[in-house]
């Protein structure tokens, strides 16, 4: 493999060959290089981390009778009679004999002259391929290998099978990886020696050789020592990057923000109920962080209805008590207004000025708000992304809370940190995140979890109903509405198009209005002008309309305690986390609440599984783990903006323990060796280059 010219800025020279051209490898020409690049394998390093997904056992057998057809078999045979095809399109057959039986090698569209040369009658050959039975006769169609007994050692005993793309063949992959494994540089060990000894992991080079050339199916498993080691390298590099971001964050000068608790006490007195243990704990963790001289970077995750908003308000009041300001950013205007309506009475009761800023504020009104904010007269600002615009200036901003529905990835958090503002940051998410994803996505943050529900929330009964019973559901709804109850009716996700989702919602709206009465039913979908959307929401919140037909716009945060029925149409087309969020819109008052999951029969196996999990449990953390196991990380978090790392070997769904181990290890390494200058630290720098964590390397040099 030729070494590329030394222009790989900063990358250690020992790694240059791995970042050269694919075409420098045996078996890869311009066409196959293009096929690999299309599959996101752009350089030798990427190919090195593309491991076989299965293998073929090609150990020598005495006879094809030693395997259960259809199966791959490698056997030494004596070549017998050749039978040329009797008419075009018929196969060419060669009868062969192993130690215990005869069978046929079968070839289509093959030259008889070539086959007579390859398989001379009376001579011995080793053949390997798939044996099948036709009318009781064994046949091997187009053997994968035909070799003389002397050459037969070339057949691997266990042949790796790689994921293929385009014009790449298994033979070309085998050749290229063989060349590449011969060029793997010897690198100093970056894993803690005690950990490596405890886990029984091989060194890096040996792990790659074992992973690419397994000797059995067991060695293909993610639990094999070699694969575990390589997965750990990936997650360790990722956790080192997050730990460096965290260390950088902590170096950023923070402000000591410690309130006297007076305004918080007023709010608690006005509540009429006691916060849960989880709310008290989370509020204390946040206050403790805010009182430290470095910036807070904390994630508050809680299940549906676990009371995050109260924890947010207490934290904002802490900033105000210390003489500063707080801001809370919501993903949509509906939610920002809802936060305003929920928080303002409590804030005002505690003598705090709370205002709303959205993209809809224009002209003089906007100017007046910005002036009051800059003067410190507005103490808490609630808003949408508009609160981050350049002309929004605070007198003394201490705490920024991001209600994290818009997926604020690691990169964006690093950018926010790089602005140098000494603001404490609290990110809130209403979607319980499985532990492995929380570690992967938020490993740079400290985490508070709300795992209890406040008093006064009633459990929700969940039932499954086929769409064929639509008329009965509408009748039940009529009775509930007559009884003064309110209902959400969520329309199906038709496809990835808001327009067709809108059509579905509008059709359902017309049908329900015809059945229940014009003034009874409202409609909300993503394509409506914001003013119309807000008006429809207001009517429903005030109880003017009794049934709200909606797309998933109402998924997060909308709070109508009187709404006690949730109908989700075509529930099988939604993800588990989404169903859980939607169900969380009811059960917010004292009335007994119901969620009807309407499905179109027949259900697929995974559709049935999802709906049954919903029926069994209301525990969002369990639901999120099941969702991860069923759909995979990208789908659960939404890959586009998730800030989730793309791992080639590590499996987020099944290797949570590795991720947790790597987080502890990375944080300890940086604590002992902040600039990565020790022998292990220097090896870890090479690992960061190898895993293309250039951002992390810049963070060390800044440090």
Image (cartoon, rainbow, N blue to C red):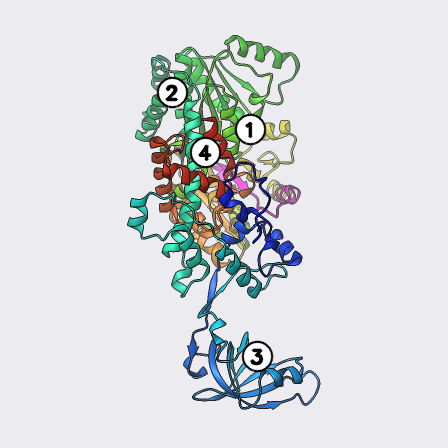
SS category of the residue bearing label 1: helix
Q: Position of residue 482 (x, y in %)?
A: 50, 37
Which sits earlier in the primary sequence, circle 3 or circle 2?
3
Would you say residue 698 is visible in this rendering? yes
Read off the residue under disc 4: 429
Q: Position of residue 60 (x, y in %)?
A: 43, 77
Quarter of the image containing the N terminus? bottom right
Q: Which mark is residue 141?
A: 3
Using the rendered view, name the quadrant where residue 624 is placed.
top left
Q: Which residues are magenta?
A: 476-505
Using the rendered view, name the quadrant where residue 390 is placed.
top right
Read off the residue under disc 2: 290
Q: What is the spatial separation of the Cα atoms under label 3 and label 1, in whole angstroms?
A: 65 Å
Q: Which mark is residue 334?
A: 1
Which mark is in front, 4 or 3? Answer: 3
Label 3 packing within 10 angstroms: few (<14), some (14-19), many (20+): some
Q: Position of residue 17 (x, y in %)?
A: 54, 48
């Amino acid at each position: 493999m030729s070494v590329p010219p030394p222009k790989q800025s900063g990358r250690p020279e020992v790694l240059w060959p791995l970042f050269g051209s694919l075409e420098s490898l045996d078996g890869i020409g311009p066409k196959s290089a293009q096929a690999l690049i299309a599959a996101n394998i752009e350089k030798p390093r990427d190919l090195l981390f593309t491991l076989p997904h299965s293998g073929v056992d090609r150990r020598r057998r005495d006879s094809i009778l030693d395997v259960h057809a259809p199966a791959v078999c490698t056997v030494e045979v004596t070549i017998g009679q050749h039978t040329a095809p009797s008419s075009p399109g018929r196969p060419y057959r060669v009868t062969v004999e192993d130690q215990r039986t005869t069978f046929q090698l079968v070839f289509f569209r093959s030259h008889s002259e070539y086959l007579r040369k390859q398989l001379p009658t009376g001579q011995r050959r080793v053949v390997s391929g798939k044996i099948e039975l036709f009318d009781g006769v064994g046949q091997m169609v187009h053997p994968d290998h035909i070799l003389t007994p002397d050459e037969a050692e070339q057949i691997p005993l266990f042949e790796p099978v790689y994921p293929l793309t385009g014009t790449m063949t298994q033979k070309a992959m085998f050749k290229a990886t063989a060349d590449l494994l011969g060029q793997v540089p010897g690198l100093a060990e970056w894993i803690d020696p005690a950990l490596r000894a405890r886990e029984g992991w091989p060194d890096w080079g040996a792990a790659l050789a074992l992973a690419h050339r397994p000797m059995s199916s067991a060695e293909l498993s993610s639990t094999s020592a070699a694969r575990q080691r390589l997965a750990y390298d990936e997650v360790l590099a990722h956790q080192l990057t997050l730990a460096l971001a965290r260390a950088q964050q902590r170096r950023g000068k923070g402000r000591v923000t410690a309130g006297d608790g007076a305004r918080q006490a007023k709010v608690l007195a006005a509540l009429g109920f006691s916060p849960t243990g989880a709310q008290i704990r989370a509020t204390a963790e946040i206050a403790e962080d805010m009182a430290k001289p470095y910036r807070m970077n904390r994630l508050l995750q809680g299940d549906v209805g676990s009371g995050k908003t109260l924890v947010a308000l207490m934290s904002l009041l802490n900033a105000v008590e210390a003489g500063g300001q707080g801001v809370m950013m919501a993903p949509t205007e509906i939610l920002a207004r809802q936060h305003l309506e929920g928080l303002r009475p409590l804030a005002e009761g505690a003598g705090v000025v709370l205002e709303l800023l959205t993209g809809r504020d224009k002209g003089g009104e906007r100017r007046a708000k910005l002036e009051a904010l800059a003067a410190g007269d507005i103490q808490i600002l609630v808003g949408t992304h508009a609160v981050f615009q350049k002309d929004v200036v605070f007198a003394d901003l201490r705490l920024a809370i991001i209600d994290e529905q818009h997926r604020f990835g690691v990169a964006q958090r690093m950018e926010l940190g790089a602005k140098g503002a000494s603001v404490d940051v609290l990110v809130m998410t209403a979607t319980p995140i499985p532990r492995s994803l929380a570690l992967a996505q938020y490993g740079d943050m400290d985490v508070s979890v709300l795992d209890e529900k406040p008093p006064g929330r009633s459990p929700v009964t969940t039932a499954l109903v086929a769409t064929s019973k639509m008329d009965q559901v509408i009748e039940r709804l009529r009775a509930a509405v007559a009884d003064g109850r309110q209902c959400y009716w969520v329309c199906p996700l038709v496809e990835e198009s808001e327009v067709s989702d809108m059509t579905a919602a509008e059709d359902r709206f017309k049908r329900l209005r015809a059945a229940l009465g014009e003034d009874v039913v409202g409609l909300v979908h993503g394509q409506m002008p914001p003013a119309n959307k807000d008006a429809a929401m207001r009517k429903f919140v005030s109880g003017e309309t009794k049934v709200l037909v909606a797309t998933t716009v109402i998924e997060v945060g909308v709070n109508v305690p009187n709404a006690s029925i949730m109908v989700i149409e075509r529930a099988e087309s939604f993800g588990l986390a989404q169903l859980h969020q939607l169900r969380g819109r009811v059960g917010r008052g004292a009335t007994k609440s119901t969620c009807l999951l309407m499905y179109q029969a027949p259900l697929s196996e995974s559709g049935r599984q999802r709906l049954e999990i919903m029926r069994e449990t209301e525990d969002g953390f369990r639901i999120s783990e099941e969702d991860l196991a069923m759909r995979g990380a990208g789908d659960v978090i939404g890959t586009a903006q998730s800030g989730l790392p793309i791992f080639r070997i590590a499996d987020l769904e099944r290797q949570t323990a590795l991720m947790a181990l790597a987080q502890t290890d990375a944080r300890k390494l940086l604590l002992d060796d902040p600039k990565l200058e020790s022998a292990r630290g220097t090896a870890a720098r090479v690992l960061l280059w190898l895993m293309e964590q250039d951002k992390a390397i810049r963070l060390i040099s800044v440090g």
